Amino acid sequence: MKKNVFFSILILFVSLTACNKDQRTSRQLDGEWNMLTYYDEPVVAPEKGILTLIKGKNGTGEGSFIYTISYDNNGTTETETYADAIGYTIRDGRMTISPKGSLFSSSYGYLQDAFTIQDATKTRMVLIVSFGKSTVFEKK
């Protein structure tokens, strides 16, 4: 009987600790982030990526992802901007980003992947995608 009570309390404690960690991570990630690397490749001007995360409850939230690229088109600088709304969930150190619009779900289906949060501080975030590549963000 004492063993059952002990294990029940232990399981409850571990569950609450995991939820609190997810909520703390969600609070840390709240805000605007500049993309420094994308799948291990540097993002350099004129390319630019901005991820905006707005925390919700229990490790969930929403936001947007905006990616801008400028390039030379026969002597004329062309700029294209791609933007999409996202939702996200943080569970056990993994962030799942779910596109809400059509851009990423149709063009870039792999962005609907779960990312492992390798490092998350108030100023820097490193996400690892399932096939091992990292994407690094710095707080604006």
Image: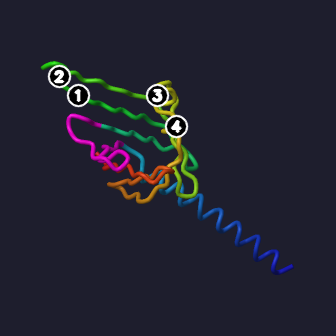
In the image, residue 83 sits, relative to residue 125, either above or below, namely above
Left/right of residue 83 with respect to residue 96 in the rendered view: left
* Secondary structure state at the residue bearing disc 3: helix
The three-letter code of the residue at mark 2 reads Thr
Quarter placement of the N terminus: bottom right
| Precedes in sequence: disc 4 or disc 2 | 2
* Residue position for label 4: 87
Binning the other alpha carbons within 10 Å of mark 3 as few (below 14), some (14 to 19) or many (20 upward) gives: few
Quarter placement of the C terminus: top left
Q: Nearer the viewer, mark 3 or mark 4?
A: 3
* Res 70 label: 1
Where does the image place residue 100, in percent across and percent down from the top left?
52, 29
* Residue position for label 3: 107
Q: Which residue in the rendered view is the most extreme toward the right?
A: 1
> Looking at the image, which residue is at 42% across and 46% down?
30
* Secondary structure state at the residue bearing disc 2: strand
Circles 1 and 3: CB atoms closer than 8 Å: no
Where does the image place residue 68, in percent across and percent down from the top left?
29, 30
Distance from label 1 to label 4 (Cα)?
27 Å
Q: Is residue 78 magenta?
A: no
Front residue of this view, candidates 129 and 101? 129
Quadrant of the rendered image containing residue 67: top left
* Residue position for label 2: 77
Circles 2 and 1: CB atoms closer than 8 Å: yes
Front residue of this view, candidates 123 and 50? 50
| Precedes in sequence: disc 1 or disc 3 | 1
